[in-house]
Amino acid sequence: MIVNYTETGWEVITQRAHGLLAAEIAAQWKHSIRTERWTETLLAIAEHDDAQVELERDNLLTQQGGPLDFKMKAFEKRHCTQTMDFALSKSRYIALLSSMHLDFVYSKDCPHDKKATIFLKNQAELRRQLRKELGITIKEAERDYRLMEWCDALSLLLCQHENQPEARAVEVSEGPDKKNHRLSQTGEDSLTVDPWPFESDSFKVYFETRLIPQLTFKDSEEFRAEFRKAPVIEKRWSIKKNV
């Protein structure tokens, strides 16, 4: 889960909500990026964190009893295995992109985590097998993954409140167009991206958050109970092309 500390308590965004926002963003990209596997690409982006179900986990708290933000977690074999099981049960192409994302996220853990090293080595072999079965080149797979990673990055920026005030730009990532894009806030609820990578000149995105006023919890079960009671708040952004 994504956790932000606010004046009124913890703002919590689930990993699945973050993934849905990433897919909303991907759906707006210029149509020239679309391939015959466009539906699978969107599903891979939307579902890349679906194995992270906060209400089914026990490691939800820090040592101080606060909710555990996703950035505080290292490689978890159970999560990664479930991610691939979910993906493979839907399509090999979704599994290919999911495997590429796990490699992107966890390769940094390999120098000090033997389990991560073994898992990712096996994933590299799986990706070779999947590309051969699907008749897809590394270049083609990397282009679609660049879209996935870019939309994931922009979604995280919005969920973590990292868009800067006063129109100060923050880098998103290099997109499938091989351009580095910057995000700027142009108004209270409006944003722009430069260079503009989207088909329409303006669109809206939204995601759900929960505000939990209690700051510490005795265990994960107490946190889950407060999470279930928390009101759902829908955050909306208008994204518009600068003219």
Image (cartoon, helix red, strand yellow):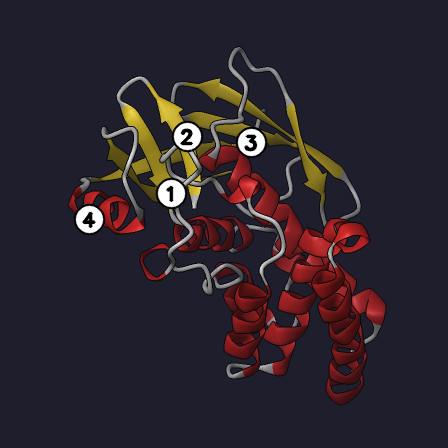
Q: Residue at left 53%, top 64%? A: 79
Q: Residue at left 51%, top 81%? A: 90
Contact between marks 4 and 1 (CB within 8 A): the answer is no
The amino acid beneath tag 2 is: Asn
Across and down, in percent, residue 21 comes to 45, 49
Contact between marks 2 and 1 (CB within 8 A): the answer is yes
Please, what secondary structure does the residue beneath circle 3 have?
A: loop
Q: Is residue 120 above or below residue 110?
A: below
Is 219 situated left or right of 103 in this image? Answer: left
Disc 1: which residue? 13
Q: Viewer-proximal residue, 49 or 35? A: 49
Rounded to the nearest angstrom, the CA distance separating label 3 from label 1 is: 27 Å
Q: Is residue 163 above or below residue 203?
A: above
Q: Indicate which label's residue lies in the foreground, 3 or 1.
A: 1
Earlier along the polypeptide chain: callout 2 or callout 1? 2
Q: Which mark is residue 241?
A: 3
Disc 2: which residue? 4
Earlier along the polypeptide chain: callout 3 or callout 4? 4
Rounded to the nearest angstrom, the CA distance separating label 4 from label 1 is: 16 Å
Disc 4: which residue? 225
The amino acid beneath tag 3 is: Lys
